[in-house]
Image: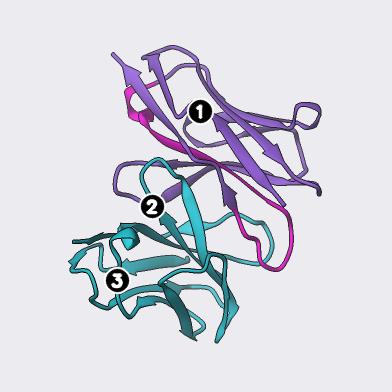
Chain colours: A purple, B cyan
Amino acid sequence: AQSVTQLGSHVSVSEGALVLLRCNYSSSVPPYLFWYVQYPNQGLQLLLKYTSAATLVKGINGFEAEFKKSETSFHLTKPSAHMSDAAEYFCAVTSPGATNKLIFGTGTLLAVQP
Amino acid sequence: SQTIHQWPATLVQPVGSPLSLECTVEGTSNPNLYWYRQAAGRGLQLLFYSVGIGQISSEVPQNLSASRPQDWQFILSSKKLLLSDSGFYLCAWTQRVGGELFFGEGSRLTVL
């Protein structure tokens, strides 16, 4: 079975500071990994994905994530936080196949302080 | 381009009443379709998924059911709502390669 653990349900950073959101996965097969962002009362929007190509993945809005197999991690980073980055972030795992079921973490709520 | 629509966006229902949430996907054929529920502080829970017309897989035994009468249509239903059915329901689709899900805007259900 696959699973995802997001460390820290709430993270607060100052505007302009580094954003680091942690995600560790468990998978018995090579995983596909995703980060999604959710603004209040909206659906989820894909930030970036890892599908076994380059281990450093760049996404939208200046975010990037690095797949580290030895650490079973896929942490999300952004060099400089912006007020508009305040949202909830979800890490998810799946493996290629007919059903493509995504298993999500419990989310990290990012607050950006002025 | 592909689009996904969910409705209603918000509804308030009494305990014991029926439920029908609808999701449609345009601009693609044979998508995989999913219903997730999001409860506060609990992330997203996969409820049902479908790989084709009439094919429904249930992930969690519960008070809800799903149907896929058309390739582009996915319906979430209940005959009698419980208080615990309250939450934010999200429909999503994907093609069978690539893996990422594309989500609708969600339906917020409050059961009183």
Pointers 3 and 2 within a single chain: no
Q: CA distance from mark 2 to mark 1?
A: 20 Å
Q: Which residues are magenta?
A: A82-102
Q: Secondary structure at mark 1?
A: helix
- Residue pictured at 21% horizontal, 65% vertical: B11
Residue indicated by mark 3: B81
Name the one closer to the observer, B101 or A4: A4
Residue at position x 40%, y 72% in the image = B63
- Distance of label 3 from label 2 (alpha carbons): 23 Å
Is A36 above or below relative to B92? above
Determine the image quadrant of residue B40: top left
> In this rendering, would B9 be left or right of B64?
left
Answer yes or no: are tags 2 and 1 on the same subunit.
Answer: yes
Marks 3, 2: nearer the viewer: 3
Element carrying mark 3: loop
Which residue is nearer to you in this view: B58 or B68? Answer: B58
Image location of residue A29, percent across then percent down: 81, 49
For disc 2, the chain is: A
Image vertical order of residue B52 relative to residue A42, above or below: below
User: Label 2 neighbourhood size at 10 Å, few (<14), some (14-19), many (20+)?
Assistant: many
Dot 2: what SS? loop
Chain letter of the residue beneath label 3 in the structure image: B
Residue toward you, A44 or A82 = A44
Which amino acid is tagged 2?
Gly
Asked whether the residues under marks 1 and 3 belong to the same chain, the reply is: no
Which residue matches tag 1?
A62
**Which residue in the structure is indicated by mark 2?**
A43
Q: Does A74 appear in magenta? A: no
Q: Amino acid under label 3?
A: Leu
- Chain letter for the residue marked with disc 1 in the picture: A
Q: Position of residue A11 (x, y in %)?
A: 43, 22
CA neighbours of label 1 inside 10 A, class few (<14), some (14 to 19), many (20+): few
